[in-house]
Image: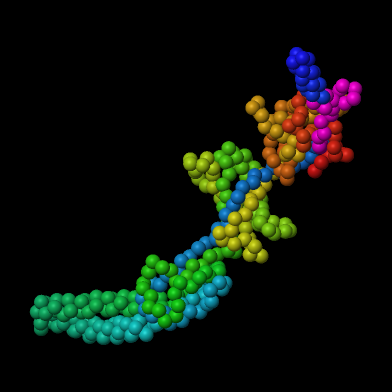
Amino acid sequence: MSTIKHFIIIISIVMTIDACSSGSKDKYGSAKAVPVTVAEALQKDVPMQLSAIGNVEAYKTVSVRARIGGELEKVYFAEGDYVKDGDLLFLIDPRPYQAALKQAEANLARDSVQAANAEKDAQRYADLVQQGIVAKEQYDQMRTAADALYAAVKADRAAAENAGLQLEYCKIRSPITGRTGKLKIDRGNMIKANDDTPLVVINQILPIYVSFSVPEKELQEIKKHQGNGKLTVEAIIPGTKGLPPAGELTFINNTVDINTGTILLKATFANNDKALWPGQFVKVLLKLGIQHGAVVVPSQAVQSGQSGSYVFVVKKDRTAEMRMVEAGRATNGELVIDKGIQPGETVVTDGQLQLSTGTTVEIKNTGKTER
């Protein structure tokens, strides 16, 4: 009796397995088609471009410091103002320096008069020496006194010029045209000469830089295309619409970073609309040129395996064929296929995990081209 039970159980298991295996077949015993989404390989001109994350940098940055010490008497701008080269920014109390200048000018005037009198005396003694009335030693003494006073006049003149320069330093002017940052000190405070903390930092943002890095393997290609003319760089700002700001590649660093294997590049943007701001991160597109007649497929059609990149091609009999390919640059959601696919062939863009060469497919999307 137990033998009959065991036989019934075995028969049930076999029927279950057969039912499960027949679930992937149709009523005629053939394997069911795997549903897939496809697209057509196209031939067209595509832009050759490199993509990277860039950082916006001020064209020039100046930390404004005082050359002299004193009380900050006036501030002529508000935080965040645009200032021009030469605009007056700060005024340090000039009265001590005005007094020092007056004293230096008085010393110069006094010593100039004394030097003139000493010169007259020396000339007079020179005549007396020629007449034999006085000894030459007396003339030499008068000459020495006059020369010493002339030297004092030169020192006084230098002191007066320095005092005038110190007085001019009371007026702190902008060395560049740009936008001011946060004011680090308020009116009425005492400031030191050449203090470590700047009074304000000014950034020039017209024009402006965007710096970014690319793999060193791209360097030769960049240099080759740069030899044909200026290279355009676009800066895509997150969250904005419309055409991105366009600039020009103006700097290639003179060394490759050995730690990252990348090389630093900079692009210059006119930035007339002030869309780019120092410290901002943007997506950078470096346009190298146009690749004419390239074969492209959607990026999702290309898979990676142990032997390299491959795609599944749908043949006319609706079976799949795994095809090894050489993929080139990515552009706008597409990949350039340098080798392995011909224009007009149908490639699978979704459902590849269930496919192998010879698998019958059922196309879910109505048209071949999916973009």
Question: Picture coordinates of residue 266 (x, y %)?
Answer: 57, 52
**Rendered residue at 56%/73% (across/down):** 81
Rendered view: 216 above or below 168:
above
Residue 295 seen in the current view? no
Q: Examine the structure image and report whether residue 177 is included in the region drawn in magenta.
A: no
In depth, the one of 42 and 322 nearer the eye is 322
**Rendered residue at 51%/73% (across/down):** 86
Question: Picture coordinates of residue 229 (x, y %)?
Answer: 65, 47
In depth, the one of 84 and 8 nearer the eye is 8
Report the magenta residues as a range: 20-39
Q: Quadrant of residue 332?
A: top right
Q: Is residue 54 left or right of residue 173?
A: right
The colour mode here is rainbow
**Rendered residue at 32%/82% (across/down):** 100
For the N terminus, which image quadrant? top right
Q: Is residue 307 left or right of residue 63?
A: right
How many labels, in total? 0
**Rendered residue at 37%/85% (across/down):** 95
Q: Is residue 347 left or right of residue 108?
A: right
Question: Picture coordinates of residue 157 (x, y %)?
Answer: 31, 78
Rendered view: 362 above or below 75:
above
Rendered view: 242 above or below 159:
above
For the C terminus, which image quadrant? top right
Q: Quadrant of residue 44?
A: top right
In depth, the one of 140 and 308 nearer the eye is 308
Q: Examine the structure image and report whether residue 32 is included in the region drawn in magenta.
A: yes
Q: Is residue 56 left or right of residue 333?
A: left
Question: Picture coordinates of residue 236 (x, y %)?
Answer: 67, 54
Residue 48 seen in the current view? yes
